[in-house]
Image: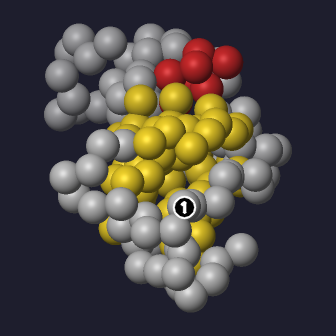
């Protein structure tokens, strides 16, 4: 729980290529107390059936930057993705076979403010992703 001197973080993943939450994606939380400070791994979690991590560790007091590392390659290998549809303007050879993923890992780094909650959703597909500060 967030206090006046600490921030809190939550995340969830939506697989936009399948139109559903991304379950069982490994997530690592790291933090640091300033731009020049080294990263400290705080712990690992995995998304539940709703694509949410409900057990991320608390951030240490003085945290200014947070990093979420999502291991998405394993998720796509398990999810039996169909090859991407051919497109008129798409490159002929784009490695779009089943299990192919362009971004095997997604690392999201962001600044936090003490006393605030930071929800960071990941919108995911085999060939792209988007993140934003949610509510």
Q: Is residue 105 visible?
A: yes
Q: Is residue 83 visible?
A: no
41 horizontally vs 43: left or right: left
- Quarter of the rendering occupied by the C terminus: bottom right
- Which residue occupies the foreground of this view, 89 or 66? 66
- Which residue occupies the foreground of this view, 103 or 92? 103
Residue 65 image point, x, y percent: 36, 61
Q: Is residue 94 above or below residue 8?
A: above
Give the residue at mark 1. 60
Residue 61 image point, x, y percent: 52, 68
Q: Residues within 10 Å of mark 1 (few under 14, many from 20)?
A: some
Quarter-wise, where is residue 97 in the image?
A: top left
Identify which residue is drawn at 70% across, 38% down.
46
Q: Is residue 38 above or below residue 95?
A: below
- Considering the numbered disc 1 on the image, is that residue within a helix, a strand or a loop? loop
Quarter-wise, where is residue 93 in the image?
A: top left
Residue 49 image point, x, y percent: 81, 44
């Amino acid at each position: 729980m967030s206090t006046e001197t600490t921030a809190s973080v939550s995340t969830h993943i939506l697989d936009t290529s399948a139109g559903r939450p991304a379950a069982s994606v490994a997530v690592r939380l790291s933090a640091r107390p300033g731009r020049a400070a080294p990263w400290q791994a705080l712990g690992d979690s995995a998304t539940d059936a709703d694509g949410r991590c409900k057990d991320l560790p608390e951030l240490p007091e003085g945290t200014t930057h947070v990093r979420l590392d999502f291991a998405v390659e394993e998720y796509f290998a398990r999810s039996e993705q169909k090859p991407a549809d051919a497109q008129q303007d798409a490159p002929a050879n784009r490695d779009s076979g089943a299990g192919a993923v362009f971004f095997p890992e997604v690392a999201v780094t962001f600044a936090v403010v003490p006393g605030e909650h930071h929800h960071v959703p990941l919108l995911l597909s085999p060939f792209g992703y988007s993140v934003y500060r949610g509510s």
